[in-house]
């Protein structure tokens, strides 16, 4: 999924809110960095983090969990507009999907080996 896919989805769910493309990209880059630092970097195939800078950049999370990006951006919009109940609902949905993604990624990827055991 690309950033532009997420932006289109959010704009469809929240018509009338004027948020710049750059702001969406910035927020998603922060989220991607959080996902990388807390989940992906602790696994062997984590690679290096590359900042998201254009709408055509691919995101980490597979399609089955990709709604977490929409819920995160919707929560940020609600927070900026002081719509606390909307923010709370979107963050609950985001946190649930993030937990599911974290469990999925941990199950399906080999963790990095932190050290070696030395037997005498």
Image: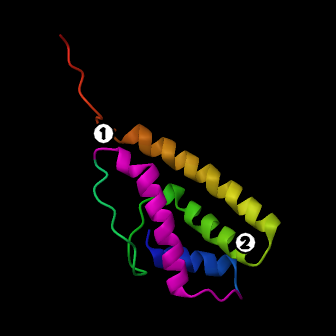
Magenta-colored segment: predominant secondary structure: helix
Q: Which mark is residue 112?
A: 1
Q: Residue furthest left?
A: 120
Q: How is the image coloured?
A: rainbow
Asked whether disc 1 touches disc 2, contact meaning CB atoms under 8 Å apart, the reply is: no
- Residue positioned 48% across, 59% down in the render: 34
- Residue positioned 47% across, 43% down in the render: 104
Q: Which mark is residue 96?
A: none
Q: Residue furthest top?
A: 120
Tell me which corner region of the image, top left, top right, bottom left or bottom right, holds residue 67: bottom right
Q: Pointer 1: residues within 10 angstroms few (<14), some, or many (20+)?
A: few
Looking at the picture, how far across and down is residue 39, in whole percent?
Answer: 44, 49
Tell me which corner region of the image, top left, top right, bottom left or bottom right, holds residue 83: bottom right
> Mark 1 to mark 2: distance in Å?
37 Å
Q: Which residues are magenta?
A: 16-44
- Residue positioned 46% across, 50% down in the render: 38
Which of the pair 61/32 is nearer the observer? 32
Looking at the picture, how far across and down is residue 90, in whole percent?
Answer: 70, 62
Provide the secondary structure element on which disc 2 rests.
Answer: helix
According to the image, label 2 marks what residue?
79
Tell me which corner region of the image, top left, top right, bottom left or bottom right, holds residue 114: top left
């Amino acid at each position: 999924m690309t950033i532009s896919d997420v932006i289109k989805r959010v704009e469809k769910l929240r018509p009338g809110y004027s948020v710049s493309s750059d702001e969406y990209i910035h927020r998603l880059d922060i989220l991607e960095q959080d996902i990388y630092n807390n989940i992906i970097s602790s696994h062997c195939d984590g690679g290096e983090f590359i900042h998201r800078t254009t709408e055509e950049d691919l995101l980490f999370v597979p399609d089955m969990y990709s709604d977490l990006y929409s819920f995160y951006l919707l929560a940020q919009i609600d927070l900026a507009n002081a719509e606390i109940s909307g923010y709370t609902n979107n963050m609950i949905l985001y946190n649930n999907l993030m937990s599911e993604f974290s469990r999925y990624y941990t199950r399906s990827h080999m963790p990095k080996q932190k050290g070696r055991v030395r037997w005498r």
